[in-house]
Image (tube, coloured by chain):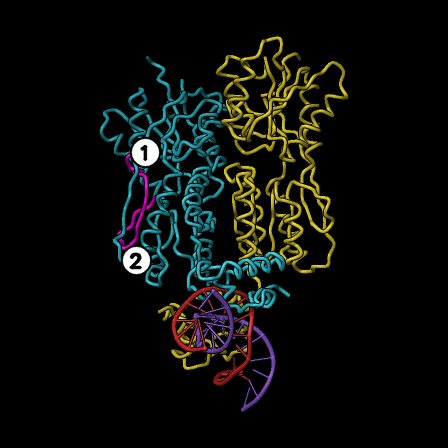
Chain colours: A cyan, B yellow, C red, D purple
DNA sequence: CTGTTAGCGCTTTCAA
DNA sequence: TTGAAAGCGCTAACAG
């Protein structure tokens, strides 16, 4: 039924080897023959079977990418960067959503290994043992936004501790004293690192306090409940500065505070994290900590391909610095 | 180097056929044997080679999805819906970004065909001839948000003409008379349909006018330039109601109008399209036309699998109705 | 219940 | 410059 090299060869009056050559090593084939074969291909509508190619090659031309949450613009941008980089090498990126679920992540990794991907780029989570095993089995791994003690695994990240410090320092500098950190679960490394940074910034300032409002995930909805719990606090207990572990949460917090009649930034200053495109378009433009998301994806693929090209090359660890983006949501009220 | 069924068989002291059976038809294998084989698999770290499986099966267990713009939350949601549906059947979704570029779309479709995907879900664009050819070659196609004259292609869509009407009727009902449509390129079917709907709504109302501000794409940035051009107009020429062809554009328009000192909705009412999650979180909460994005993805995969299961089943065409979501950006000023 | 074996469609030596 | 033939790793008959 399906057209294969055999059919093309017959139609062009050549052997299958020749057909393969016009496909892969055109220079070895006489122009006239190549022309004839090409016509046959077009006429019959021949489409190469990638499975067969891979089987021979032993490896596919794909890269696996596992993200925590594809609907978070930060990861969408990251994926974008990875795809762009892969595209220039004629590689394709398979994206999988873990939804921060260990099982789904495992399933995705299994599939990727079965596909014999060149390598895998993984954002947070992922069992270190599993990762090590994958590398032993020849599937290269690059970690995004997560460091590891395993010296054989490359990683690319943004300094989350510095980011947390940057955020809280900014709040304190603009006159806030009672800071709340909204985020969670803290089992996510990025979250705990940002919290560490926040704590550190608080520690170096007299008369400032930090309270933690833990969330179960990092969505707008969760942000809204966190915001509601802040609205419900005794005014004397209430923070005057909120640092949300990502922009989605911050947006939710903003919605809840405003509908609770609390003014931003007058009553409470608010800063997010990631600086997604929408941050500048929220009700009150949101201050945030910018991460080079696209570049992260791009660099992750770079690192991966470097190891594919030379498996003996040492693992690399690249860390980018976050930047503070100040907008209205943290404008100082006392000049 | 890599572990194959052969190695597992040797280690377990059985034949390759038996190994294959514990993998695919466990019920045919004696429990004790199966146990032994399983141990060998775990011990050796055997990972099935999907390419080989596919080669035998003739088809892969993947579905291809081509979207216009993965960074648009509307498409992200759509993809999400498709993935969820696919996951329940143990299928994986390969997502490709066309960026509204015909070449990239072609490349993606080629890759999908080479992978022998079960079928492809395509949002806008796509050459009808190419689609027909793909179907002839056995790759099923489902169109999203785009109808076709080809009776053999299934499609799922939201009625864009109705949506356009809904939007403009709402503007007119709340007292606006000089309406501007912001969107483009009009070569995108969704855009032209929404414009048709808008025109129709205008046509049925006395004393209303419609002007078109065409954009080259549908991003926040383009929206901002469109907004700036509106700000630059003579006040007497300026519209008092703007209908943006998607929310990203609307957000850009909002930014430009506000920084140009134009009040929303007092001076100009603004309505977008898609009702992405962020629409309710913009500076002025944005009215929009809601589309069941997730459901679109879900349904598209349903339709695809129906045809995979029974290639002779007739093509289906499902059309959802859009809904009006009213928020502050269009609140009537004159009560 | 288990073993043997013939390919799936392609690439790639090796000869001619 | 082209052809013939040997697999890549797996599954699915078919025998035993």
In the drawing, what numbered circle is on residue A322? 1
Q: Position of residue A301 (x, y in %)?
A: 37, 47
The kind of secondary structure element at disc 1 is loop
Magenta stretch bounds: A145-163
The kind of secondary structure element at disc 2 is loop
Q: Position of residue D5 (x, y in %)?
A: 47, 78
Dividing the image into 4 quarters, which one contains the N terminus of chain A? Answer: bottom right
Residue A263, placed above or below residue B80: above
The residue lying toward the viewer, choosing from A25 and A328, is A25
Determine the residue positioned at 66% across, 48% down: B129
Query: What residue is disc 2 on?
Result: A311
Protein chain holding label 2: A
Q: Neighbour class for label 1 at 10 Å: few (<14), some, many (≥20)?
A: many
Report whether residue B57 is seen: no
- Residue A18 lies left or right of residue A211; in this view the side is right
Residue B72, placed above or below residue A176: below
Dividing the image into 4 quarters, which one contains the C terminus of chain A? Answer: top left
Q: Is residue B119 magenta?
A: no
Q: Earlier in the sequence, mark 2 or mark 1?
A: 2
Report whether residue B262 is seen: yes
């Amino acid at each position: 039924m399906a057209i294969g090299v055999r059919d093309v060869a017959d139609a062009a009056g050549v052997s299958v080897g020749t057909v393969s050559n016009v496909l892969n090593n055109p220079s070895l084939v006489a122009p006239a023959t190549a022309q004839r074969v090409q016509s046959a291909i077009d006429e019959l509508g021949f489409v190469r079977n990638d499975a067969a190619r891979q089987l021979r090659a032993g490896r596919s031309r794909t890269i696996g990418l596992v993200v925590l949450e594809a609907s978070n613009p930060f990861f969408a941008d990251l994926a974008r960067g990875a795809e762009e980089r892969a595209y220039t090498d004629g590689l394709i990126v398979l994206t999988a959503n873990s939804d921060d679920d260990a099982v789904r992540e495992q399933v995705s990794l299994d599939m990727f290994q079965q596909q014999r991907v060149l390598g895998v780029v993984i954002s947070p989570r992922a069992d270190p043992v599993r990762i090590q095993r994958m590398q032993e089995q020849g599937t290269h791994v690059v970690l995004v936004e997560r460091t590891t003690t395993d010296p054989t695994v490359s990683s690319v990240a943004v300094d989350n501790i510095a980011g947390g410090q940057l955020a809280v320092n900014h709040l304190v500098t603009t006159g806030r004293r009672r800071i709340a950190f909204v985020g969670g679960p803290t089992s996510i490394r990025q979250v705990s690192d940002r919290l560490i940074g926040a704590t550190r910034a608080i520690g170096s300032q007299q008369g400032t306090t930090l309270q933690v409002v833990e969330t179960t995930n990092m969505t707008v909805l969760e942000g809204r409940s966190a915001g509601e719990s802040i609205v419900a606090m005794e005014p004397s207990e209430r923070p005057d500065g909120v640092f949300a572990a990502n922009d989605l949460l911050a947006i939710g917090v903003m919605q809840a505070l405003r509908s609770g009649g609390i003014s931003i930034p007058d009553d409470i200053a608010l800063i997010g994290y990631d600086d997604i495109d929408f941050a500048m378009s929220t009700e009150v433009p949101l201050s945030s900590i910018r991460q080079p998301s696209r570049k992260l994806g791009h660099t992750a693929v770079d690192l991966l391909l470097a190891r594919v090209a030379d498996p003996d090359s040492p693992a690399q660890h690249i860390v980018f610095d976050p930047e503070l983006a100040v907008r209205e949501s943290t404008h100082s009220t006392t000049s």
